[in-house]
Image: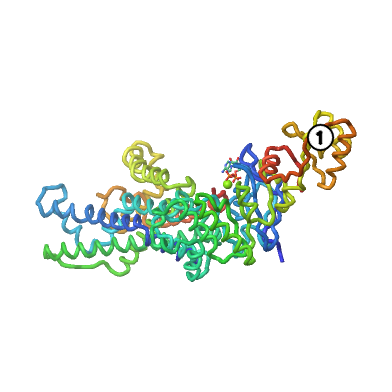
Amino acid sequence: MWRSWQAEMIKLAKRPAAWLLLVLAQLLALLFTYLFPYASYAGGTEGPNSDRTLPMLLPDQLVGNSLGGLPVFLGAIVLILGVLAVGGEYGWGTWKTLLTQGPTRLAAYGGKLLALAVATLVIVASLFATGAATSVVIASVESQPVAWPSLVDLATGLGAGWLIATMWAALGALLAIALRGVALPIGLGLVWLLAVQNLLAVIAAPLLDWVAEAQKGLPGPNAGSLAAALGATGDTPGVAAVVGGGQAALVIAGYLVAFVAAGGLLLHRRDIL
Amino acid sequence: MKPPVQIEGLSKRYGGLTAVQDLDLTVRAGEVYGFLGPNGAGKTTTLRMLLGLIRPTSGQVRVFGARPGEPGHLRSVGALIEGPAFYPYLSGRDNLRLLARYAGTGAHRVPVVLDLVDLTDRAGDRYAAYSLGMKQRLGVAAALLKDPRLLILDEPTNGLDPAGMADMRALIRRLGAGGCTVLLSSHLLGEVQQICDRVGVISKGRLVAESSVAELRGTAALRVVAEPVDRAASVARALFGDDRVRVVDGALELAVPPERASAVNAALVDAGVAVSELRLRERDLEDVFLELTSGGLTHVA
Ligand SMILES: Nc1ncnc2c1ncn2[C@@H]1O[C@H](COP(=O)(O)OP(=O)(O)OP(=O)(O)O)[C@@H](O)[C@H]1O
Ligand SMILES: [Mg+2]
């Protein structure tokens, strides 16, 4: 598994698509978390919360701001990464090439998951770094005090973000294995993350009590609750405290384990065609 | 030592379709074994089961005594199954380096195998930009990475030009001579005839013959053109038995040793048959193959 992990890291690092996703994640986070709100503040647009806008962009809000995107749109990006890392082997027919070199299927799968976990850590950490740099610039331009979250809060936030991102990546990997490819898993994953989840939360849950209850067990709302518990604003799509932070973290960890196990089981049992 | 390949009672069913049925096959150490069969015969399916890529419906495969899934099952096995598959965004060389990592062999084998398949010049190009023949060579190079004791090649000359095919055959012969056991599938008789020590012929998932190339070709047949042919046939049948006499294109073909020629002639003339031609005819492998795989014969040697 160690050797497979090294090989997977090389594949990810040399794959242009992986870098594209990293850059895209930074860009989206930067635009929606900082630049658009700041532009509206600087332009003096009278929004409903305009007096609250600037404080939200300062360094002490770093943890919440960095996690806000993960329940939905940044989650979608790491899901795509998970699909690409696993589904590519189906698309190119490279499973047979790789497996005939010797690693067992589970070792190869384990290597992939470890590499994905490293990738999600890099993505989440770089979200924090970009956010930190941006908020410092905003604070100095606006002559606001620079106060950082405590180290414990930062570490908790980083860990929570990593957990959420890895859970989505594992879902991507599972979809890729289940559907043996790239296109359909990405399509279905995005439909779920971007459309169905939202429809459930915005339309179905307010109407039907049982949907509202069932939501509390789904990965998206739990990711949203965890982000909210750590300071992400409720303005961000998908962020809402439907359950407590601790419970949310446990449920997400449960999903992570379940996705990983289901993917491993399927990969182990099915024929490689 | 355990035989490189041991297959016992192997079957694979896909729903109603039986791709491989009750196959027994052993490849001995050091030989170049040709696995011969028409399209859809079950060659690739068998080789995939050998490598643990697909699970048999029943039966067993062992590679150097180890079953698929056991650790070290593929430690000294190199394989190219049904066409090459690599990462398109990496160069040929980087693809091999990557696979060397999976295999746990050092990267030092990479230039060696690139050289063996004559791809060193273009090793820096992206795989996506390779021609079909170059991809195939890279596939063989990857199979050689581990310096394997058993090499499994599924139609290795696919997509190669005549010179490339000749090179590939020479390479396989060289590897065989160097002590590497080779299991090679093909539907090209000429190829197998040139490089293999033994052949197994598979048709519709069953092994229909297994022997050396010489044995498979069989003893030469005696071809007799005689008039009337019915009369000649019944005389010959009385002499040698039904299964040794066939009527092909209006002539008799007798599966008898050449030294019986004069006896055959005498018997026919005695029976009042006019013999106009009597000669030895080497059956070429093509005939044998078509005969075996079209279900004309069902014996297993
Ligand atoms: N995944 C699959 N699902 C269903 N049927 C399959 C599958 N793979 C192979 N088959 C069937 O099994 C049979 C044997 O196929 P196989 O690929 O082993 O043939 P082959 O001898 O390698 O032929 P070729 O010379 O064309 O490569 C064929 O009838 C094929 O259609
Ligand atoms: Mg085939």
Where residue A218 appears, as percent x and y from the top left, is 41, 47
Q: Is residue B158 left or right of residue A118?
A: right
Q: Nearer the viewer, residue B34 or B206?
A: B34
**Tag 1 subunit:** B
Q: Quadrant of the N terminus of chain B?
A: bottom right
The residue beneath circle 1 is B275
How packed mark 1 is, by other alpha carbons closer than 10 Å (few <14, some 14-19, many 20 or more), is: some
Q: Nearer the viewer, residue A114 or A258?
A: A114
Q: Nearer the viewer, residue B93 or A33?
A: B93
Where residue B50 appears, as percent x and y from the top left, is 63, 54
Count of marks placed on residues: 1
- Residue beneath the point at 70% across and 52% down: B213
Residue B136 visible within the image: yes
Question: Element type at marker 1?
Answer: strand
Q: Amino acid at mark 1?
A: Val
- Residue beneath the point at 31% across and 66% down: A154
**Residue extending furthest toward the right:** B270
Q: Is residue A195 left or right of residue A181?
A: left
Q: Is residue A180 above or below residue A15?
A: above
- Residue beneath the point at 35% across and 37% down: A204
Q: Is residue A51 above or below residue A209?
A: below
Q: Is residue A26 left or right of residue A7?
A: left
Q: Nearer the viewer, residue A85 or A174?
A: A85
Colouring scheme, one of rainbow, by chain, secondary structure, one colour: rainbow
Displayed quadrant of residue A214: top left
Where residue A32 appears, as percent x and y from the top left, is 23, 52
Displayed quadrant of residue B269: top right
Residue A262 visible within the image: no
Where residue B102 appears, as percent x and y from the top left, is 50, 64
